[in-house]
Amino acid sequence: RRRCTRWSQRSQAAGLANSGSSGVEALWKLLRQRRRQIQDEAPEFSLELAGELKMSFDKVTPQDLGVTPEDAASVQSKSGVAYQEIYQGPDMTLAIFLIRAGGRIPLHDHPGMTVCGRLLFGRMRVRSFDFDLSDEAGSAAPWLFGRHSGQRALVAADAVLGPTPVTYSLSPDKGNVHELEALDHC
């Protein structure tokens, strides 16, 4: 994972360190207040908690994090992806990904985890899959490759998100195997 120091330092100075009443502050407040419930309900959250998390994510803006499409355009890694961890703990990780147009995060999963994401700007294609658990010998489901070689999967979603900001989520058993492709700088 490649870190992008220019926007990392600016995001800490602009939004994360002094977030005040920003979307980031509202998100941190919810995570602190509901930490025990998040731990107890993981990996699947109640509809109430999932709704509260989504509402908090919906308030986060690029300005809160000090990131711009120009920052995404300047990502120099071969993959076109830059990563900055915000928080790492035993029960969750919060991170910022910047993806240059044409960049992608290849097919992967987060076993046993709920994934919440927020597209702040640009357009991104999200393809997600569910494992084909049927015993049908003639299943038409395509084969997965990489870590999931030998497993068949059904397309759970194939959607373009953006250009307006949008919050999305993947559950432990629905769409957890996924890939992201930046159609614009995002």
Image (cartoon, rainbow, N blue to C red):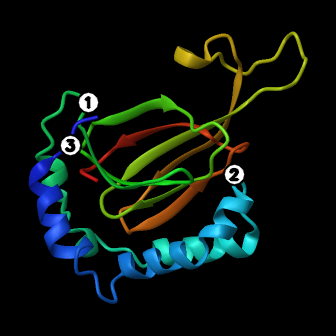
Q: Residue at x 10, y 46 (%)?
A: 74
Q: Secondary structure at mark 1?
A: loop
**Residue 63 image point, x, y percent:** 23, 74
Q: Residue at x 30, y 62 (%)?
A: 121
**Residue 81 image point, x, y percent:** 27, 39
Which numbered disc flags the more N-terminal residue, 2 or 3?
3
* Residue placed furthest toward the bottom: 21
Mark 3 lies on residue: 3
How far, Cα to Cα, is label 2 from label 1?
29 Å
* Residue placed furthest toward the right: 135
How far, Cα to Cα, is label 2 from label 3?
28 Å
Say which of marks 1 and 3 sits in front: 3
Which numbered disc flags the more N-terminal residue, 1 or 3?
3
* 155 horizontally vs 13: left or right: right
Figure quadrant of the N terminus:
top left
Task: For label 1, count other residues whose C-alpha is less than 10 Å away and answer few (under 14), some (14-19) or many (20+).
Answer: some
The residue closer to the viewer here, 48 or 75, is 48
Mark 1 lies on residue: 79
- Identify the image quadrant of residue 148: top right
**Residue 40 image point, x, y percent:** 73, 61
Q: Is residue 62 above or below residue 155?
A: below
Q: Is residue 170 visible?
A: yes
* 60 horizontally vs 129: left or right: left
Mark 2 lies on residue: 43
- Amino acid type assigned to the residue bearing label 2 in the image: Pro
- Amino acid type assigned to the residue bearing label 3 in the image: Arg
Q: Is residue 70 visible?
A: no
